[in-house]
Amino acid sequence: MGAVFVKPGTESPRTRIKTQFAGSIRRGEFLVGAAIGAGILGQSAEQGGADFVLALGAGRFRIMGAASVACMLPIRDSNEFVKSFAPAEILSQCSVPVYFGASTLDPTLSVDELADQVAKMGFSGVINFPTVAHFPEPIREALDTAGIGFSKELALFAAAHARGLSTLAHVRTGEQARASAALGVDIICFNFGWNAGGAKGLASELSVEEAAAHSREISRIVTRENPEALFVLEGGPIEDPDHLASICRVARIHGYVGGSTIDRLPLAESVTGQTLRFKSAAVLARVLKREERNLVAFGHQIGLAGTSEAMVRVYEKIRRFSGSNESMIVSGEVGTGRQTTVEALHTLSGQEPASLAVVNAGETSGQQLMISIFGRGAVQGGGGSLTGLAARDDISTIAIRGIDHIPLKMQARIAVYLERGRFTPIGGRRAVHSGKRLLFIANAPLESLVAELRIDPDLAQRIEGHEVHLPSLRDRSEDIEELLDVAIARLTDSVPTQRPVLSPSAMLRLRRHDWPGNLPELRAFAAKLVSHHAGGRVDEEVVQELLSGESAHSRRRVLTERDIILDALWRHGFHRGRTASFLGISRKTLYNKIRRYGLTGQT
């Protein structure tokens, strides 16, 4: 056995920590450990009240942009990796106890020598991470047979105790927890697996309710074996303090160790948010001039929204043509607000809303469309005449949706009408004078229709210079937040507290979405958001689910007996007597079912 680095008459780190943490527990405090891989994160965690810090290779990998699970791969000498950054960056920056993240998977490793090195470097304790506990049972058994399994990690703890070092054991099963507690390990951390959430997180196999059931059972095992051992949790479905509080209500827990939940998730969110703010600096810096503010207010009055430069140009054009009786074209993708714009152009010319008629060229034949607009003369032996919209006194504006669906020959007839101000009904002989205004609605801008030969040249020339083109949502992504706020406000007008709050990464995901359905798609998204997440905080994963149409609500599976029992345990604080009574079964039957469905945490 190597030397012991505790001077005679001095208090060992282990004794000091046990006394300190025991006092904290007596005062009703909750211990928090930060598993990190950089000095600035250790400083930040300590300033936030962390009681101890874990210097882990997994934490360093997260800072490098990889997932925590990368620490389990044979790509680095884990112990040398931690030595390369922890002494200089973390030990020198933190005043709280720092634990060395040690791996015993190297067959040539001497746990005594490693414990000597950890103590000499000045660490307060040791933690088995990366740990074989994360491997499946067959692999764990094979590693134990090879002498590099969990038993070697226990040997490391014993060596650490001999040197006055505190110990923290990561465990995944009841048997590992029992063995660690029996050895006298100071802190038992029940690890649910790799954290869920965020861009690098793995999906958790456990629900919060299942995590509570496991925590309760493991806590009992630890207490029975070693009442002085502290019991803490880490990983799995615990993504925020609310999840942890739910588990604490039913299980005896002294603290929590946060890895991804303390550095990766909040750091990524913070960096994302700050980057977005810098990215939007140009937009934020573009203070609207008085004229632009007036145009935005004008846009709101006519039913449009957005402060982007593209929309300010739209407002300017619409206002320029207000009061005009000129025929025009309104272009843009479906759902960009073309109908609203047409109605605004009509009413701004001083006409009554009811005097606007809309015909859809895509839903009828070219001949029938011409009859709808210009009417039909009396047909010999075939009935009387039909008055078209262009001749009706109650109609002042005709909006034609889908101008490019009309055959070019018939478009030419419309061009003649615009030039001469008169028309001849289909099959008729006498010309009729008319000054109706025509507003054309098209999916593509006029220049594209001309280039693709989808519009009659004379008609294009008649409306050239009289176009309002509406940008798609993807072409004015800076307006997404405002448009979403407007949509949500309309849905939650009577109950403002139901408005969801989107994280920066969630908003970034919305800005990067293509929005093929434009405004109707955004309004539908807002409705789903309010329906499923009223008043809650919404992250990027939720946004992705709602955009893809695969919400958690739509993926609910059929409840099994295991689900029912787990829910009943949860509802009754895991009190088996009350749960059995609620389910109408005996305590023995309930106990057998708990074991059968793996709700004991001893797997």
Image (cartoon, helix red, strand yellow):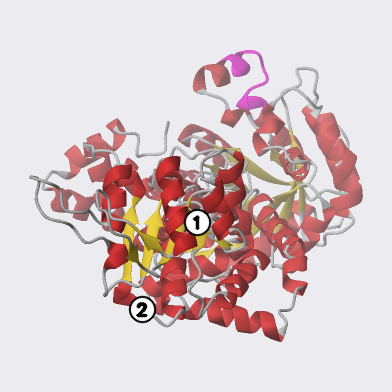
| Residue 326 among those drawn in magenta | no
Task: Give the residue type at disc 1.
Answer: Ile
Q: Nearer the viewer, residue 406 or 139?
A: 406
Q: Nearer the viewer, residue 242 or 248?
A: 242
Between marks 1 and 2 in the image, the one whose residue lies nearer the viewer: 2
The magenta stretch is 142-152
Q: Residues within 10 Å of mark 1 (few under 14, many from 20)?
A: many
Check disc 1 and report the residue beneath it. Answer: 253
Query: Where residue 492 appears, x then y in whole percent?
Result: 37, 74
Where residue 132 sits, quadrant-wise, is top right
- Quarter of the image that includes the C terminus: top left
- Quarter of the image that includes the N terminus: top right
Question: Is 27 placed left or right of 281 in the picture?
Answer: left
Query: Where residue 92 appears, x then y in whole percent?
Result: 90, 56
Task: Give the residue type at disc 2.
Answer: Val
Identify the residue at image location x=54%, y=50%. Answer: 458
CA–CA distance in space, label 1 to label 2: 37 Å
Check disc 2 and report the residue beneath it. Answer: 495
Q: Is residue 109 above or below residue 276?
A: above
Prevailing secondary structure of the magenta residues: helix
Specify whether residue 255 is in view: no
Question: Is 277 placed left or right of 576 in the picture?
Answer: right
Query: Where residue 432 appears, x then y in whole percent?
Result: 32, 64
Query: Where residue 534 appears, x then y in whole percent?
Result: 39, 66
- Secondary-structure class at tag 2: loop
Question: Is 128 placed left or right of 400 in the picture?
Answer: right
Where residue 363 sits, quadrant-wise, is top left
